[in-house]
Image (cartoon, rainbow, N blue to C red):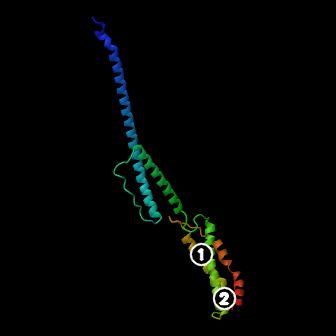
Amino acid sequence: MNPSTSPWASWPAYTELARRLDEVRRAEEEHSENVQRRVEAAQNRISELDSYLSTQRGHLTDLARQVRQPRPAFAEPPPEFTGALEETIRTAERYADEAADAAEEVARLATEPVLLPRWSVRSRNAVIYLMAAGGALVGQAVLLALQALDQISWWTAAAWALFGLPTLAFFVGYVLVGVLGVPRTGASEVERSPRLGFAICMASLPVWGVLTELIRHMF
């Protein structure tokens, strides 16, 4: 019997081919399993992202209503992905996070008043009362000018300048604090600093003498 034709002579080549075939099969199975795991992970991320975006839409809609702005118009998603799936998901997640950060900043700003939002409550209220007191000073000057022209009596001018206008300025400032010091989202309680406002408005009284001298020299 020829040794080269013996079936045992081809057995090593057969086992080597079988081994290689098994390696190829295992590699294909591992590749398929990896692909399946990546697909399942991508599906989970897409599902989580969809839920996150739905929650974010509701939050933005509520926030727009609180700050008295029109309902935001949300763009429709593209009909199909462009580019790699992983990269598309990462981009969508990044944009979603940036939108959430922007919404948090808007919500924070909405809790602050329109006038001087970065200032403290007392400082902002002081500015408002000062504006009201400034209006009282202008009124005092007008009264003194009218009195110098004999349009009104000295007692009428003095009564309004010393009592009426400062008191009126205090109440005007008190009301303005409740309007300009309210956050966009609204607040049940607003610190109006009435003692500070009263002191500022009454501080216009010493100006009476200065204005009197100025008006007297002018007329």
* Residue type, mark 1 in image: Gly
User: Within 10 Å of the Cα at label 1, are there few (<14), some (14-19), or many (20+) other Cα atoms?
Assistant: many
Give the residue at x 34% y 23%: 21
Quarter holding the C terminus is: bottom right
The mark nearer the N terminus, 1 or 2, is 2
Q: Which residue is mark 1?
A: 173
In the displayed structure, would residue 161 be above or below residue 65?
A: below
* Residue type, mark 2 in image: Leu
Q: CA distance from mark 1 to mark 2?
A: 23 Å
Q: Which residue is mark 2?
A: 144
Q: Does dot 1 land on a helix, a strand or a loop?
A: helix
Give the residue at x 36% y 55%: 76
Q: Is residue 68 left or right of residue 205?
A: left
Q: Position of residue 97 (x, y in %)?
A: 47, 51
Is there any visible trace of residue 159 in the rendered image?
yes
So how many labels did they put on this image? Answer: 2
